[in-house]
Image: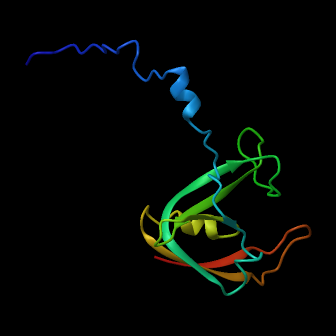
Amino acid sequence: MQTQTVTNNIPANLGAISAADLEKLKPVSALENIPTLMPAKEGFEIGKTLAGYFVETRKVVSDKLTTSKRDENGDKYAFLHVLRDANNNKFGIWGKGQLDGLMKAVRPEQFVAITYKGVADAPLQKGQSAPHVFEVRA
């Protein structure tokens, strides 16, 4: 058996872009200027179902978020679940309660229907808010 040594002959200009071409590109944002819906707010009230093809889940980091979730750097974050409708229009649903966990089972391009069921009737400790409940069908 012969052993072959592979060297990485990477061209110096690999991935290069001219300043003029770079100027033509637009900055990418986590939200892509897509409409987003928040459970329990206008557009995604109790009992309403939103459906579409699952695109991806994005972690959005911002000091402006009202979430109590913090990552390992101490930054506030929330998950945005991005779907697209039959006309290829993207929209996002902000993760709340059990939705983030349920969406882990959905595969990209799988058709999914998400129904907001409201807030759980559960005993809470002082300072806790009741978890939001969803039904996810795929």
Percent position of residue 62, x then y: 76, 47
Would residue 30 be found to the left or right of residue 61 on screen?
Answer: left
Toward the viewer: 48 or 84? 84
Residue at image x 50%, y 21%?
18
Position of 42 relative to 104 (above/below): below
Q: Is residue 105 visible?
A: no
Q: Is residue 92 visible?
A: yes
Percent position of residue 117, x then y: 68, 84
Toward the viewer: 119 or 86? 86
Q: Quadrant of the C terminus?
A: bottom left
Would residue 48 be found to the left or right of residue 113 on screen?
Answer: right
Task: Give the quadrant of residue 131.
Answer: bottom right
Position of 91 relative to 123 (above/below): above
Residue at image x 53%, y 65%?
89
Q: Quadrant of the N terminus?
A: top left
Task: Give the quadrant of residue 82.
Answer: bottom right
Residue occupying the far right of the picture: 126
Residue at image x 72%, y 84%?
46
Percent position of residue 134, x then y: 63, 78
Percent position of residue 22, x then y: 55, 28
How many circles with numbers are drawn on the protein?
Answer: 0
